[in-house]
Amino acid sequence: MLEVKVLGEGAFGIVDLVLVEGPGSRGGLLCVRKKLLKQTASNHSDPQTEVEMMEACVGAAFVVQLWSHVVGLYDYTLLMEYCPYGSLDKLLQVVSAQRRQRSACLDWLGRHVFGSEDIQGLKEQEARFFFACSLVGLEAMHQRGIMHRDLKPSNLLINSQRYVRVADLGLAKRLGSDSKATSRVSSVA
């Protein structure tokens, strides 16, 4: 059985959740459909490069896995590992909002009785864990000669085991032992 649910739609594509049930199925897969754009000075995204970078990272620890892809005339589709807990960026927003909504009484007790600061965002132990996962993912990419070039919380996804996976290799670049990255790229944070 196959079920498709749209998770989001942006200026350059659609993200679907594809649920596959049955023997040997992987469960949820993320289907990203992106429009093909002409490369310009401000748009460095190349679908073939993204696919090559993801294929080079198959089996890499803490990097989102690519299961399949199709490149058409007007768009391309990536079928990837589904990370049900979303991005680290979304987690940070939710955690910060929840910690801001605590009661005034608990805040006063925390500051005056226990001497703790008002915490927004992740606790240090949580931040260290997510940072370590990201670092191992980047190390796996660097061992394969790949530089990410667009690392930010929205490109760090949290999988079903609650580990961070490095995602969105659209701006990644392969570096040889003697090559350097001289171009400046990034996406809107």
Image (spheres, rainbow, N blue to C red):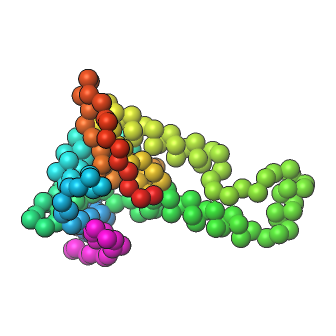
- Is 41 contained in the magenta span? no
Q: Which residues are magenta?
A: 1-15
Residue 157 pos. (x, y %): 42, 55
The image shows residue 24, relative to residue 186, as above or below, that is: below
The image shows residue 67, relative to residue 129, as above or below, that is: below
Q: Is residue 2 left or right of residue 103?
A: left
Q: Is residue 120 left or right of residue 38?
A: right
Q: Is residue 59 left or right of residue 123?
A: left
- Is 11 contained in the magenta span? yes
Q: Residue at x 57, y 64 (%)?
A: 93
Q: Residue at x 45, y 51 (%)?
A: 152
Residue 115 pos. (x, y %): 86, 50
**Of residues 70 and 173, the one drawn nearer to the viewer in this rendering:** 173
Residue most toward the left?
73
Q: Quadrant of residue 55?
A: top left
The answer to whether residue 23 is seen in the rendering is no
